[in-house]
Every structure is written in C-alpha cells, then in structure tokens.
Amino acid sequence: MTMKRIFIAILTALVALVALAQTPQAMLDKCVAAINTQGGVTANYSITTGQGTSKGALSMQGNKFRIISPEAKCWYDGKTQWSWSPVTSEVNITAPTADELQMTNPIAAVQHFKTNFNMKRAKAKTAKTYAIKLTPKKKKDNIKTLWLYFDENTSLLRTARFEMSDKSVYIIKITDYKHKSLPASTFTFDKSQVPAGTQVVDLR
C-alpha cells in the first residue's frame, strides 16, 4: 500500500465525524458538510500492517490538511502541497491537480468512495458499533473490501479496516478527536518538523 493510499485511508476516516445518517451515502455527505461547518479538526491515528504499527497526528480544516508522522509529513494549504519522506530526505513542493488531490484531499477521497464503491450497512461484531462495508465496483481496484466501524454512543469513526487484493490488511484507528479553529500556518510547510538542512525541491 503506497503512502498516498495510506493518506486516503487516514483522511477519509477522519472525515466521518457526525451522526450517522439513514444510509451510508447520506452519512458521507453529512460528514463532508461537518468538516466545512465545525471549524478545524485534530486527531491521532495509528496504522497497523503486517510490518508493525506506526502512529501520527492529523489536522484538517475545510480542504486543508496536515499529517505529521515519522514515516511521512504533508502540508496542504488549499493550493500548494509540501511532502517530506525519509526515503527521499527532501521536501517536494507541488501544486496538485484535481486528480492528484483525490489521493490526498479528504473531500475528494469521499467522493471517490461514493462514486467507485458499493456501500451497505454490515452486521457489527460488538454492541454499540455501527459497521459499513464497502466493495469496489471495478475489480482492478487494489482494495478488496473496506470496513468502517463507528461508536454508536458518540457517532465517531474509530476503526477502518482495509482488506487488499493481495490479501494484505491495513487497520487504521483514530482517537482523541478535537474540534478547534486552526491558524493558516498549520497547513504550510514547517521546517522545524524535518531534519535541519533538508533540501526543498520546487516541482511546480
């Protein structure tokens, strides 16, 4: 699973912050509206794979977002994106196209799932849990099945489980949701978050 795919998983999970609607599709629409009407959102996340678990922090407001973790750091201010990876040891500046934003922007990611996946309510394994099962309409998609698990007491998405076509499994857990208004600087490159002397490459 690529880092961009992980971004989709994380950000799409974060979008699910409001009370569950009558249908999964309607619920996603309300989640998108909630992001735009309740100010900013911060949360912590963990991603568990066959190789172990990684953790990070999220910040999001409108169509802007920031992801901070040891494996990747990304800032997007609504126009410009800065991405850092320990693999390249550099920060890349880009001006993403609409198609590219589908891989990172939470609103675009939700629209992707609504358009390209079938959704239905599933039977939850535990009490007080609302589960949704998503399956891709096209078999060529790398995701075989996506499961979303909500806490019915709080209506918050707590877990997303991705079952991939290669039989690998990715489990994302989101905790410590907080609503707050975030300054614009939150979503622009912060050099203190990367090693001193890191090269910044403008690819625009």
Image: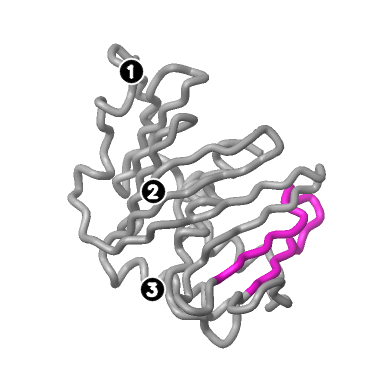
Instruction: Return the x and y of residue 51 as percentages of the image width and height.
Output: 67, 32
- Viewer-proximal residue, 182 or 47? 47
35 sits left or right of 162 in the view? left
The amino acid type, in three-letter code, at marker 2 is Leu
Vertical placement of residue 131 versus 58, above or below: below
User: What secondary structure characterizes most of the magenta part?
Assistant: strand
Amino acid at circle 1: Pro
| Element class at badge 1 | loop
Q: Which residue is mark 3?
A: 33
Name which of mark 3 and mark 1 comes first in the sequence.
Answer: 3
Q: Residues within 10 Å of mark 2 (few under 14, many from 20)?
A: many
Q: Which mark is residue 195?
A: 1
The numbered dot on residue 58 is 2
Magenta segment includes 140: yes
Q: Disc 3 vs disc 2: which is toward the camera?
A: 2
Specify the segment rendered in magenta. 131-150
